[in-house]
Amino acid sequence: PRFRSQRPAFRPSGTLMNRLFTYFIVGSMVLGVAGRWGGDQGLSAQQGHLLLSVLEETNRLSSISKTLLLLSRADAGKLVVEKQPVDIALLIETILDDLEILGAQRELRIEKQVPEKLVISGNEQFLQQLALNLVDNAVKYSDTGGTVRVKVRADGDRCVISVANTGPGISPEDVPRIFERFHRGDPSRNRESGGHGLGLAISREIARAHSGDITLHLDQPGWTEFRVDLPIAEPGSSL
């Protein structure tokens, strides 16, 4: 089925598209020059640093472009979600395996409550992107030595995924805009964490495309929690 976003059609500004195009052109040129450097005599430390910077920026802008395309499709009602049974518990556990490695680097405590199996109906690629966005945010915005908590549970005919973290939290003025596209909140925090302000927006569109939603909860002092609500697969569905 096709999913249409609940917001007006999104059209990237000319400035944004020009910026993306310029970076791709410059990136291609620098990569071409770097190839000639490497073919002749190898890269110097300065050239290697430049190449790495260009690669990182090109990859970042490629990610932005793909996200903008997905959002545009959702707004135009052209986002096709091919649904099939997905074991969301297994998907989350796989992500948490990587999270534990990242958490160790920042001395984060990882808490999880995930059932052995919980099948929902959805697109595995989109659901993985949704979960990765939330877990990535939790890690980025946790203080060193903080805690990231992930829970997955069935609630009647719904699946509830909770991703929470300790840390500085979200300011009251940012709460109403937290799911807006390109909204990044406190500039000082975002200079450190990176990102482009699209992760939560695309996560919400993915949840809604699966007949669900994502909400922010700040009722527990010291914690920031995002909660995803999705329908469980109908009885008889199997992987």
Image (cartoon, rainbow, N blue to C red):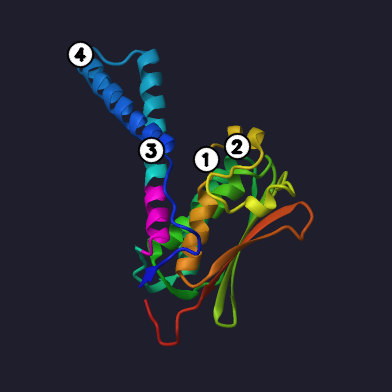
Kind of residue sitting beneath label 1? Gly
- The percent position of residue 170, horizontal first and vertical second, equals 70, 48
Q: Verify CB contact (< 8 Å) between mark 1 and mark 2.
A: yes
Kind of residue sitting beneath label 4? Asp
Q: Is residue 167 left or right of residue 54?
A: right
- Which residue position is annotated with label 1? 195
Q: Which residues are magenta?
A: 66-77
Task: Look at discs 3 and 2 and give the one toward the viewer.
Answer: 3
Asked if residue 157 is positioned above or below residue 51 in the image, the reply reads: below
Measured Cα–Cα span from mark 3 to mark 2:
22 Å
- Which residue position is annotated with label 4? 40
- Which residue position is annotated with label 2? 190
Q: Earlier in the sequence, mark 4 or mark 3?
A: 3
Q: Earlier in the sequence, mark 1 or mark 4?
A: 4
Kind of residue sitting beneath label 2? Asn
Foreground: 47 or 210?
Answer: 210
Q: Earlier in the sequence, mark 2 or mark 4?
A: 4
Measured Cα–Cα span from mark 3 to mark 1:
17 Å
Judged from the image, the secondary structure of the residue bearing numbered disc 2 is: helix
Measured Cα–Cα span from mark 1 to mark 2:
7 Å
